[in-house]
Image: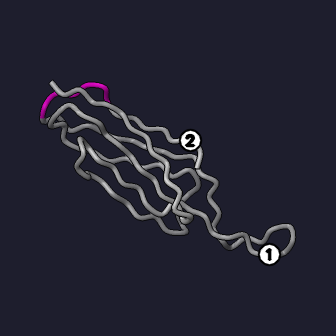
Amino acid sequence: MTNALVSVPKTAARGAIVDIRAMIAHPMETGYRMGPNGIEIPRRIITRLKCTYDGAQVFAAEFFPAVSANPFVSFSLIATASGTVAFEWTDDEGQTETASAEIMVS
């Protein structure tokens, strides 16, 4: 995996609903294409995304072969306390990519 981009507001009022966005650049391969040598290229896709907020899981998604390359995910959460919003993507090979951002709640 290569590059993860996350968008988390730097500040929020306590109890406010905030939008969270995340995208990862990944060399997605469906497993249905043939290589130049005529051998099928093995499937390699993002299979799972997990997001935690101040250590508690707030969002999770499982992806399947129809997922687009460089998947983009957007969801909302309620800002309850200052802390870290952490993301973890896992692919078919078990490799993980992580990213995080801090949010200050007042």
Q: Is residue 13 left or right of residue 95?
A: left
In front here: 47 or 64?
47
Q: Amino acid at mark 1?
A: Ile
Label whose residue precedes the other's in the sequence (1 or 2) = 2
**Residue 20 drawn in magenta:** no
Q: Position of residue 44 (x, y in %)?
A: 61, 64
Above or below — where is 103 with respect to 28?
Answer: above
CA–CA distance in space, label 1 to label 2? 28 Å
Q: Quadrant of the C terminus?
A: top left
Q: Which residue is mark 1?
A: 39
Q: Which residue is drawn at the image coordinates 48% and 45% (left, top)?
A: 23
In front here: 58 or 77?
58
Q: Which residue is mark 2?
A: 3
Q: Residues within 10 Å of mark 1 (few under 14, many from 20)?
A: few
Q: Amino acid at mark 2?
A: Asn
Q: Which residue is drawn at the image coordinates 56% and 50% (left, top)?
A: 70
Above or below — where is 39 with respect to 15?
Answer: below
Identify the secondary structure beneath mark 1: loop
In front here: 69 or 49?
49
Q: Quadrant of residue 86?
A: top left
Res. 102 mark:
none
Q: Is residue 106 left or right of residue 103?
A: left
Above or below — where is 95 with respect to 30?
Answer: above
Identify the secondary structure beneath mark 2: strand
Magenta segment range?
Answer: 9-14
Q: Which residue is drawn at the image coordinates 84% and 75% (left, top)?
A: 38
In front here: 96 or 37?
96
> What residue occupies the far right of the structure in this picture?
37
Q: Of helix, strand and loop, which mostly describes the magenta segment?
A: loop
